[in-house]
Image: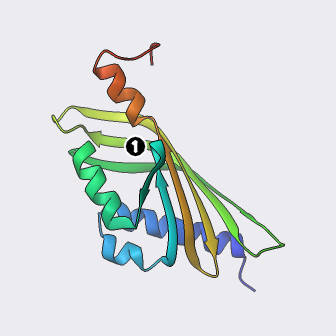
Amino acid sequence: MTDPAAAAKALVETYLELSMIPDPERAAAYLAPDLALTFTGGRRFGGPADCAAFNAKRYAWVKKRFLFTDAALDPATGDVVVYNTGHLYGAWPDGTPFDGNRYVDRFVVRAGKIVRIDVWNDSAEILLDRAGLGEAPL
């Protein structure tokens, strides 16, 4: 018998790896048609191609360094909630490299497809600090 939490973790990590290439077409195969996808700041996107387009404006390039992927099965619904945490690294549009930009991604996996993704990271705070608008030292 397959462990639903382990299967959901593997599905999410594969989706993230495809998203980082970026290969939005192959990544989309892991998503439910009614996906709810929300980025930091409440930005809603329709799928991986929208995310790649957004990231192309914010970064020269960006990748994720996974630290942990944790999953919990909701026995009442069969949904699996998966958290993937780590650090973003890459370069800002001006070519300045960065590393250590924390992120948390939360996924809901239902019947072998990702139905919800919520994304949080430190990019906005870092950009505010670079523009001299930071309210406290990072």
17 relative to 23 in the view: left or right: right
13 relative to 6 in the view: left or right: left
Q: Which image quarter is the C terminus in? A: top left
Looking at this view, is 96 or 135 the one in front? 135
Residue 115: image quadrant is bottom right
Please name the residue shown 47% across and 13% down the image. 136
- Give the SS element for disc 1: strand
As drawn, the residue found furthest toward the left would be 94
For label 1, count other residues whose C-alpha is less than 10 Å away and answer few (under 14), some (14-19) or many (20+): many
**133 to 92, vertically: above or below:** above
Task: Tally the marks.
Answer: 1
Please name the residue shown 29% across and 21% down the image. 130
Residue 75: percent from left, percent from top: 83, 72
Residue 69: percent from left, percent from top: 60, 56
> Circle 1 sits on which residue?
88
Please name the residue shown 64% across and 82% down the image. 111
**76 to 133, vertically: above or below:** below
Residue 102: percent from left, percent from top: 48, 38
Q: Amino acid at mark 1?
A: Leu
